[in-house]
Image (cartoon, rainbow, N blue to C red):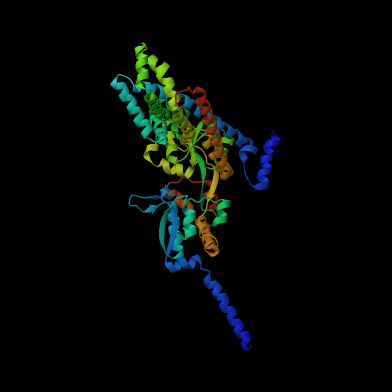
Amino acid sequence: MQDFWDWFRWLYEATGINLSIFYDAFDRAHFLAGAIMTLRLSAVCIVLSVVIGIVGAWLQESRLKFVRLMVYWYIQFFRNTPPLVQLFFFYFGLGGLLTSATGSGEHVPLVGNVTWAIVSLSFFAGAFNTEIFRSGVQAISSTTIEAAESLGFSRLRIYCLIVFPLALRVSLPALTNNLVNLVKTTTLAYAIAVPEMLYVTSQIWSDELNVPELMNVLLVSYVILAGALAYLMRRWERALHLPGFGA
Amino acid sequence: MNGTLALAAMAATLGFSMVTAAHADAVSDIQGRGTLVVGVKADYRPFGYLDTSGTIVGFGPDLAADIAKQLGVKLQMVPVVASNRVQYLQQGRIDLILATLTDTPERDKLMEMVQPHYYGAGVNILAPKSAGFKNWDQLRGKKVCLIQGTFTNKDLQAKYGVQGLAFPGTAEAYTALRNGSCAAFAYDDTAIQGELLKPQWKDYDMPLTSIFFTPWSVGAKKGEDHFASLLSGMVTGWHKSGKILSLEKKWGIKPIAFAQQEHDKYR
């Protein structure tokens, strides 16, 4: 294994291409930690934002005007503001208010920066997901819903058993788009010092001064990550395909 | 001497004189112009900042005024920042950089870094007084705010075991410190001193001794050997006469060991 890493040291000495994240153990450990943090952020945010999307699309059809209004304002706030601004608002703004006193009388924030990043990014992608699922729900013809109502299904059961499964299949391409975007948007967490891949790599290249090499490594890493997600979503799409419904 | 030899001698003298006349010396340019243009910081208290009337004042501007006085010309100051000061010098917009410029081997290739160094900065922390930090080992395992890209970050984390939280800009780092997201903020001791002059930091101080000292140089354009040697004489004079030490007192800067050492060396 050490021989494999040493090859990159030879590469640096022979050609000047400095891939220190391979031959230097310290940089290697840091880069790996950054990659794991990115994977963690992506996975948690994807799951949370999809849940928010499903719940939001359901609440948009609510009979109570108050509930519909709440969902409307949630979407307006989180879709119309830049995600970086949202991150700053949560971490520096709200984070500064939500403090508790420690034993020595100093105030420390209750919520850490990773948690705020997850909250902010999930809400951001959740707003888009709500609209994506709404477009799927509206694609279901009203005759299907009337048929279900005439069979005695309650509103909740219609949504869970009939409307949402069909809506999901319709909205999968748009959902894939948004989730791939979410994976790339996790890089913004570097601005609140979350040690994800971009943050860690920028620390490494300011020490080793190998900016072009590491920029390329970052690019390739995100292509692989986003590509893997898109591939899995496509596989899922094909598995969910209903003959006669959609393309 | 016969005619041809005299002609050859005259041609040679003319040739040499043309060579020396073509080399535009910075000193003669400045004296011909009657003004010395110096790039100084305008946002780095107290080494260069704007006072209430809008003039740039501080440690750097005072030294620039002295150089202009010794050259017998007027002084014109141009505000610069770290990202444009070298370019301004190379383009000829300024004759000198007197803007907290750290001397590094890479920069030495791009311009004349006047020796000896006139001042320097180390790394220290801004922390609440109630935290009671006395030495660097107390920071082991604690969250410390840093600035992304600073070359001392790696050493602080590897050698002193701090848990670094690096932000893109100083504003974010100061806000995170105030919110309690980190126990302290490690940065240039000179910048922290300037920040502590502001009233909102009255419950904070800079308790430790500075480490990772990096020296500052006056910067002149590459190839200006005569100008650089003149400046070198002036900087040595500042150390010899104790001007640096008295300027430290004037601007309320915590005295650094370097200034005292240089004064003792050249006295």
Q: Decide if residue B145 is on the left or right side of residue A71.
A: right
Task: Identify which residue, B125 or A215, lies in the foreground.
Answer: A215
- Where's residue A62, x and y in %? 32, 20
* Residue occupying the point 44% across, 26% down: A246
- Where's residue B237, x and y in %? 51, 58
> To which quarter of the image does residue A68 belong?
top left
Please identify the residue farthest to the bottom as the structure is shown: B2
* Residue occupying the point 65% across, 44% down: A12
- Where's residue A49, x and y in %? 44, 26
Please identify the residue farthest to the right as the structure is shown: A3
How many numbered discs, if any? 0
Please identify the residue farthest to the front as the structure is shown: A244
Q: Is residue A129 above or below residue B189?
A: above
Q: Is residue A109 above or below residue A11?
A: above
Task: Identify which residue, A224 or A172, lies in the foreground.
Answer: A172
Where is the C terminus of chain B found, in terms of image quarters?
bottom right
> To which quarter of the image does residue A225 belong?
top right
Task: Identify which residue, A65 or B251, lies in the foreground.
Answer: A65
Q: Is residue A52 visible?
A: no
- Where's residue B245, x and y in %? 48, 51
Q: Is residue B121 above or below residue B27?
A: above
Task: Identify which residue, B88 or B239, lies in the foreground.
Answer: B88
Q: Is residue B226 visible?
A: yes
